[in-house]
């Protein structure tokens, strides 16, 4: 066996580069973080061949003194931490002191910098593990880092790089993440001599609009919540803005883009009730907390973190987004205005009296009354076990009124037995009556069950199953929580658990698989949504079967009753499957269709 020997520094750097510099985008991330930590407010990025041939980042930050230039390219040399206590409360993006050293070991790198107050700039170059002596250079301020021929000296690694277009796509994603988190900084990105992005210093909402589009800003729901030292802000997309992939999900912790299982789980659960099957939500969320409450020293690429109190973070994320998505039609979740940001006009405002020639007239106003709204099918027997639900309140015609119009207005007609047409102060409302009624019934069913504690169904013969050590420990530590959820578990051996009771509403489900899912949730996040999710799947099916069907003729009072119920129901903008329940066509939209005023 060969003798144990110390590896040369250059080989150590190349090994580290395998973790830190996965592709050109990884190198770009390290360079951008250094510029931001240096206090730059104007950063320019130039790429050639997707960053494989050249990555050039120039900034107007504080610069590096000439005596420290060689240290900037040395392994484990940094200005950001000095002792263990600093590592436990990192307030900068970079801190490991290995980013530039790793990049320099697998490229031809040059570093030019002019420190504040210096007479001129200085430049050092690194190639093949050799570092040149600092030489005078021309630079007005800040720092310029140029990385040429990435992986030129490790051809095996270079073969793993993808096409120029693919690598540029990854670099662009990194650029957009940094730009989103730092709107107070101007960013410019060019590729092969052509400018792709030019972002001035702007507000956070303006930057979101620039990166994710004006439509996301206009239709997105504003988030602003805090719990003690935890603060959450940003925008989440409505369920109808969902996408097939996760490419528009941005979550930042203290200005750092991260991908975290706990965060993803919390947001996925918040959208569970309103998102269609395999669709993914869109969001740009910014989470702030004291540095000592989060550990960023988890992964070399710094894309993962560990929260000191993960349960508090989970609860804040899930409950905040759930409440926003549950906003009624009245617009309780409209974006909060900030400089440079114009929110959507609220739907509920005082309606001006119609003027001659305006092209529209006041719809009749209806007062609330109690009239039954039937359904096309007989109500299944399983509704009988629930608390009786009130029939939809109906509306009877009264005197016309031109003010205080409700958000969804007043019904005009029914189209093809499927859609309800209504008029509000903004124009025409089109409602899918089955989808809307389905959501109303679903929320009422959930509310009826939530008013009672979960009832357990003892099993005639307990189900015994093999459990992992983690499942055994969770069952013991979370016995009170399991009991509240309707489960009764007891150990029968060091490796087996006996299931003696399950929630009565889910007694037909695979009880052991359900129990394992609950234990997994309890172990990971300290709470379980599995029971709620399974129960809600059942209630959604019940609501779908009980909702008013297509081709069912509704009277005007019934249509108006449906509209009023929608306004009072949480999440009424989408049905249980994530489809929209209504759309607004404004007068401006209609004028465009008929070329009025053109």
Image (spheres, helix red, strand yellow):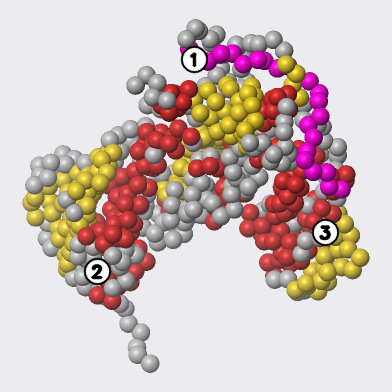
Quick check: 483 above or below 511?
above
Picture residue at 8% right of the left edge, 47% below the top: 138
Residue 421 in the image, given as x and y percentages of width and height: 61, 28
Q: Does residue 555 show up?
A: yes
Q: Residue furthest front?
A: 416
Q: Which residue is mark 2?
A: 151
Q: In the rendered view, does 335 fall on the left or right side of 315?
A: left
Q: Residue furthest right?
A: 460
Marks 3/2 in contact by CB < 8 Å: the verdict is no
Mark 1 neighbour class, 10 Å CA radius: few under 14, some 14 to 19, many 20 or more: few
Picture residue at 66% right of the left edge, 57% below the top: 521
Q: CA distance from mark 2 to mark 1?
A: 68 Å
Q: Quadrant of the N terminus?
A: bottom left
Instruction: Looking at the image, tell me whether mark 2 or mark 1 is earlier in sequence order.
Output: 2
Residue 157 in the image, given as x and y percentages of width and height: 30, 73
Helix, strand or loop at mark 3: loop
Instruction: Looking at the image, tell me whether mark 3 or mark 1 is earlier in sequence order.
Output: 1
Based on the picture, tell me whether residue 360 belongs to the magenta stretch.
Answer: yes
Residue 280 in the image, given as x and y percentages of width and height: 52, 50
Helix, strand or loop at mark 1: loop
Picture residue at 75% right of the left edge, 18% below the top: 396
Q: Which residue is mark 1?
A: 359
Helix, strand or loop at mark 2: loop
Q: Quadrant of the C terminus?
A: top left
Picture residue at 59% right of the left edge, 53% below the top: 277
Q: In the rendered view, does 480 fall on the left or right side of 576?
A: right
Q: Which residues are magenta?
A: 358-381
Marks 2/1 in contact by CB < 8 Å: the verdict is no
Q: In the rendered view, does 398 fall on the left or right side of 52?
A: right
Q: Which residue is mark 3?
A: 507
Q: Quadrant of residue 560?
A: top right
């Amino acid at each position: 066996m060969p003798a144990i020997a110390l590896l040369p520094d250059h080989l150590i750097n190349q090994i580290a580069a395998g973790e830190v510099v996965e592709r050109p985008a990884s190198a770009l991330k390290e360079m951008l973080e250094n510029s931001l930590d240096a206090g730059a407010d104007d950063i320019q990025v130039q790429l050639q061949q997707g960053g494989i041939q050249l990555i050039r980042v120039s900034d107007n930050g504080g610069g590096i003194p000439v005596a420290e230039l060689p240290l900037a390219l040395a392994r484990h040399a940094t200005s950001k931490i000095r002792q263990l206590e600093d590592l436990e409360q990192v307030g900068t993006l970079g801190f490991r002191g290995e980013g530039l050293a790793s990049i320099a070991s697998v490229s031809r790198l040059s570093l030019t910098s002019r420190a504040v107050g210096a007479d001129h700039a200085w430049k050092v170059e690194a190639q093949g593990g050799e570092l040149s002596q600092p030489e005078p250079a021309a630079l007005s301020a800040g720092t310029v880092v140029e990385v040429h021929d990435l992986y030129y000296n490790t051809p095996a690694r270079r073969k793993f790089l993808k096409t120029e277009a693919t690598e540029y796509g990854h670099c662009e994603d990194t650029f957009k993440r940094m730009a989103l988190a730092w709107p107070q900084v101007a960013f410019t990105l060019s590729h092969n001599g052509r400018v792709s992005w030019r972002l001035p210093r702007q507000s956070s909402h303006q930057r979101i609009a620039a990166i994710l589009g004006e439509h996301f800003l206009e239709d997105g729901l504003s988030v602003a919540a805090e719990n003690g030292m935890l603060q959450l802000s940003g925008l989440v997309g409505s369920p109808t803005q969902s996408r097939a992939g996760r490419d528009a999900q941005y979550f930042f912790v203290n200005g750092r883009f991260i991908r975290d299982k706990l965060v993803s789980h919390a947001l996925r659960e918040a959208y569970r009730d309103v998102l269609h099957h395999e669709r993914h939500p869109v969001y740009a969320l910014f989470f702030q907390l004291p540095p000592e409450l989060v550990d960023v020293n988890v992964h070399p690429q710094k894309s993962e973190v560990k929260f000191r109190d993960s349960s508090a973070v989970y609860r804040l994320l899930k409950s905040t987004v759930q409440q926003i998505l549950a906003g009624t039609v009245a617009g309780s979740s409209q974006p909060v205005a900030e400089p440079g940001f114009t929110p959507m006009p609220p739907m509920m405002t005082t309606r001006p009296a119609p003027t001659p020639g305006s092209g529209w007239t006041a719809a009749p106003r209806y007062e609330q009354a109690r009239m039954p709204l039937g359904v096309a099918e007989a109500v299944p027997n399983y509704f009988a076990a629930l608390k009786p639900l009130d029939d939809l309140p109906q509306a009877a015609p009264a005197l016309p009124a031109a003010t205080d119009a409700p958000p969804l207005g007043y019904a005009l007609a029914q189209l093809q037995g499927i859609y309800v047409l209504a008029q509000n102060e903004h124009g025409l409302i089109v409602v899918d009556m089955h989808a809307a009624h389905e959501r109303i019934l679903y929320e009422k069913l959930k509310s009826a069950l939530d008013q009672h504690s979960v009832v357990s169904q003892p099993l005639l013969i307990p189900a015994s199953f093999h459990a992992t050590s983690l499942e055994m420990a969770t069952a013991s530590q979370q016995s009170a929580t399991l009991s509240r959820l309707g489960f009764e578990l007891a150990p029968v051996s060091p490796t087996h658990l006996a299931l003696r009771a399950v929630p009565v509403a889910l007694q037909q489900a695979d009880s052991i698989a359900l129990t394992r899912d609950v234990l997994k949730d309890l172990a990971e996040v300290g709470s379980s949504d599995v029971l709620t999710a399974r129960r809600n799947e059942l209630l959604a099916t019940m609501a779908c079967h009980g909702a008013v069907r297509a081709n069912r003729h509704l009277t005007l009072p019934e249509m108006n009753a449906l509209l009023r119920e929608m306004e009072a129901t949480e999440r009424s903008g989408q049905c249980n499957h994530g489809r929209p329940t209504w759309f607004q066509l404004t007068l401006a939209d209609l004028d465009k269709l008929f070329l009025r005023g053109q």
